């Protein structure tokens, strides 16, 4: 059993809505449990029968359909394990998503995705459905769009018990694959399965699409870690790599007098070209300690800096690209590198002064494509 217990995402605001939703679910289930133990619809007490009837009407069913039950069914659960699993998943993911969407936005997103999943269920199945699973799955998918490169702390229980940290994409991908397999198995099985797997998958899909679109149109402010920015950075790296592939790598001219720094630069460039960028990076920093003025070629410089940033070694990556700006001042991609550095200083390194300096120095050199991102960084710095 894998139980998510936390993420490495830092929050700027208290997740009041997440706590409220969990509290309401637990309170309503406690009432369900008490009413059931008191006889439910067959109870001798009129109040108990009244509450039991409300719970029955609150379930979502295509046979006895009410529009308001698209919301109420999300707060009813079939048993202790049902509600415990849902709330355990909602807590870590809900806190991170609410922090990015805001309290009202998160509440509307949670209820809306749950309602959509429930409605799709009524179009395909006649059995009633209860539970927050569709809503929670949507929140999990939203988390992946907003923070795909983060890690999740999980409690692993299987013969041994331990807490491990795994990549978010890996864990969520595992649960999506498990739900998909369970849905396919239920379709070919002759026995009836009460779990609404389709609601889970619709939750994942709707949560992913809605969050991605909200990021794309600016309803949710982009961050350094979300999926849309990763895609844009990937495209920029591809363009940069294509551009740099046309630039010859530092070549050793045997006709000239050999110099220790030249030999070092050539060795680092060859390591990077072979794809061993980690070795090239280590070699580069070791060489800098002995030769502070060491100047490697532009292509190798980019490979080392990009590798460090991709491995979340932001400070080291920024240092490498700062040297790039100072050593390759005439390079055509200096404005793009400066914009990348400004974003890192503003969003990761808490150095607004240097971010502002870079934006001012290159503001007239930014392309139209990058002007929007520059303005966004400036607005973040002014907050």
Image (tube, rainbow, N blue to C red):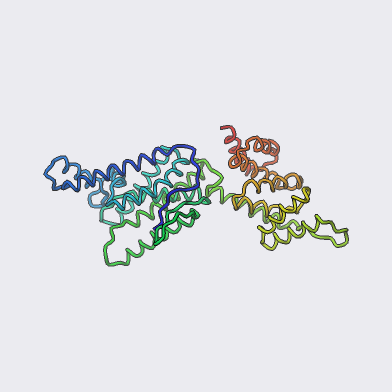
Could you say where residue 280 lies in the image, as x and y percent from the top left? 70, 57
Question: Looking at the image, which is closer to me, 111 or 15?
Answer: 15
Could you say where residue 7 lies in the image, as x and y percent from the top left? 47, 48
Q: Quadrant of the C terminus?
A: top right
**Residue in the picture at 35% in, 41% down:** 21
Position of 177 compared to 343: left or right? left
Position of 285 compared to 43: left or right? right
Question: Looking at the image, which is closer to me, 50 or 66?
Answer: 50
Quadrant housing residue 346: top right
The image shows residue 323, relative to residue 175, as above or below, that is above
Position of 231 compared to 132: left or right? right
Position of 274 compared to 14: left or right? right
Q: Residue furthest top?
A: 382
Please say whether residue 50 is visible from this viewpoint: yes
Question: Looking at the image, which is closer to me, 300 or 111?
Answer: 300
Could you say where residue 190 lies in the image, as x and y percent from the top left? 27, 67
**Residue in the picture at 77% in, 57% down:** 264
Q: How many marks?
A: 0
Q: Quadrant of the N terminus?
A: bottom left
Quadrant housing residue 106: top left
**Residue in the picture at 72% in, 54% down:** 284
Quadrant housing residue 67: top left
Please say whether residue 299 is visible from this viewpoint: no
The image shows residue 21, relative to residue 261, as above or below, that is above
Q: Residue furthest left?
A: 44
Could you say where residue 283 lies in the image, as x and y percent from the top left? 71, 56
């Amino acid at each position: 059993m894998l139980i998510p217990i936390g993420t490495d995402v830092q929050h700027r605001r208290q997740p009041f809505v997440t706590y409220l939703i969990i509290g309401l679910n637990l309170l309503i289930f406690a009432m369900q449990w008490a009413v059931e133990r008191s006889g439910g619809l067959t109870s001798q007490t009129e109040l108990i029968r009244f509450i039991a009837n409300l719970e029955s009407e609150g379930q979502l069913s295509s046979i006895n359909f009410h529009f308001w039950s698209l919301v109420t069914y999300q707060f009813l659960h079939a048993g202790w394990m049902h509600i415990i699993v849902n709330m355990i998943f909602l807590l870590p993911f809900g806190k991170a998503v609410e922090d990015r969407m805001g309290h009202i936005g998160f509440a509307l997103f949670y209820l809306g995705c749950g309602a959509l999943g429930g409605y799709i269920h009524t179009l395909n199945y006649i059995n009633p459905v209860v539970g927050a699973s569709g809503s929670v799955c949507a929140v999990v998918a939203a988390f992946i769009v907003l923070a795909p490169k983060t890690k999740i702390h999980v409690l692993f229980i299987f013969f041994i018990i331990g807490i491990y940290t795994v990549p978010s994409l890996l864990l969520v991908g595992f649960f999506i694959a498990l739900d998909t397999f369970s849905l396919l198995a239920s379709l070919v099985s002759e026995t009836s399965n009460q779990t609404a797997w389709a609601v889970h998958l619709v939750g994942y899909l709707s949560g992913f699409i809605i969050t991605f679109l909200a990021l794309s149109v600016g309803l949710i402010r982009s961050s350094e870690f979300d999926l849309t920015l990763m895609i844009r950075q990937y495209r920029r790296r591809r363009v940069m790599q294509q551009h740099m592939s046309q630039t010859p790598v530092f070549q050793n001219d045997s006709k000239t007098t050999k110099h220790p720094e030249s030999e070092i630069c050539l060795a680092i460039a060859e390591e990077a070209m072979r794809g061993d960028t980690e070795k090239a990076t280590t070699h580069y920093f070791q060489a800098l300690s002995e030769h502070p003025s060491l100047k490697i070629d532009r292509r190798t410089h980019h490979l080392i800096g990009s590798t460090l940033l991709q491995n979340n070694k932001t400070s080291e990556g920024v240092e490498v690209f700062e040297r790039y700006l100072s050593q390759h001042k005439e390079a055509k991609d200096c404005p793009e590198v400066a914009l990348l550095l400004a974003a890192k200083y503003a969003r990761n390194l808490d150095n607004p002064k240097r971010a502002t300096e870079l934006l001012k120095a290159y503001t007239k050199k930014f392309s139209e494509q990058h002007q929007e991102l520059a303005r966004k960084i400036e607005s973040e710095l002014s907050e």
